[in-house]
């Protein structure tokens, strides 16, 4: 975690400086780019601070040890549904929701309905059927 939060927090001053330079280069007349760059600085700051707080609560990982071996990171990394189709349905619903911005707001309701079904199916995937616990 130590490398990750350093990378994100190092990007904060970069985006601030680039935002100011962009503002000077455009005579502060084009606000979308300036606001976008400054909001990006805020976003990487929030992610970096989250990673700092998480790193303080966790023990060091094998990736944090400069002399660590690849074998130290072997083993289970989490619980994943290997044959799940629900992530595809969730991604499709997100695509429909974003298409609603271009096509029409009526499509948003369809995308949200598909998204709710997909999310519930994904969350409760291990509660029924072959993979039930």
Image (cartoon, rainbow, N blue to C red):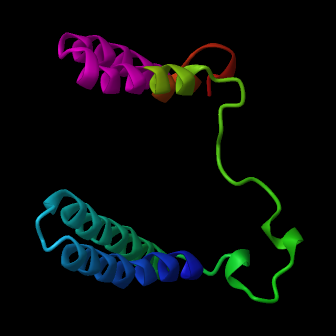
At x 73%, y 86%, the residue is 65
Nearest the eye: 80 or 38: 38
Among the 4 quarters of the image, the one containing residue 23: bottom left
* Magenta span: 93-121
At x 42%, y 78%, the residue is 11
Q: Position of residue 70 (x, y in %)?
A: 86, 71
44 versus 11 height, above or below = above
Among the 4 quarters of the image, the one containing residue 125: top right
Q: Position of residue 89 (x, y in %)?
A: 50, 19
8 versus 117 height, above or below = below
Q: Position of residue 19 (x, y in %)?
A: 27, 74
Residue 79 shown left or right of residue 10 in the figure: right
Q: Position of residue 10 (x, y in %)?
A: 44, 83
Quadrant position of the N terminus in the picture: bottom right
Mark count:
0
Residue 100 shown left or right of residue 76 in the figure: left
Quadrant position of the C terminus in the picture: top right
Magenta span dominant secondary structure: helix
């Amino acid at each position: 975690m130590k490398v990750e939060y350093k990378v994100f927090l190092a990007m904060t001053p970069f985006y601030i400086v680039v935002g100011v330079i962009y503002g000077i280069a455009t005579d502060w007349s084009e606000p979308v780019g300036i606001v976008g760059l400054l909001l990006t600085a805020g976003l990487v700051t929030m992610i970096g601070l989250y990673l700092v707080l998480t790193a303080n609560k966790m023990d060091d990982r094998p990736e944090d040890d400069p002399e660590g071996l690849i074998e130290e990171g072997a083993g289970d990394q989490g619980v994943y549904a290997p044959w799940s189709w629900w992530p595809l349905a969730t991604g499709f619903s997100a695509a429909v929701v974003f298409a609603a911005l271009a096509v029409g707001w009526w499509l948003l309701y369809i995308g949200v309905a598909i998204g709710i079904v997909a999310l519930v199916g994904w969350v409760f995937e291990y509660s029924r059927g072959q993979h039930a616990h």
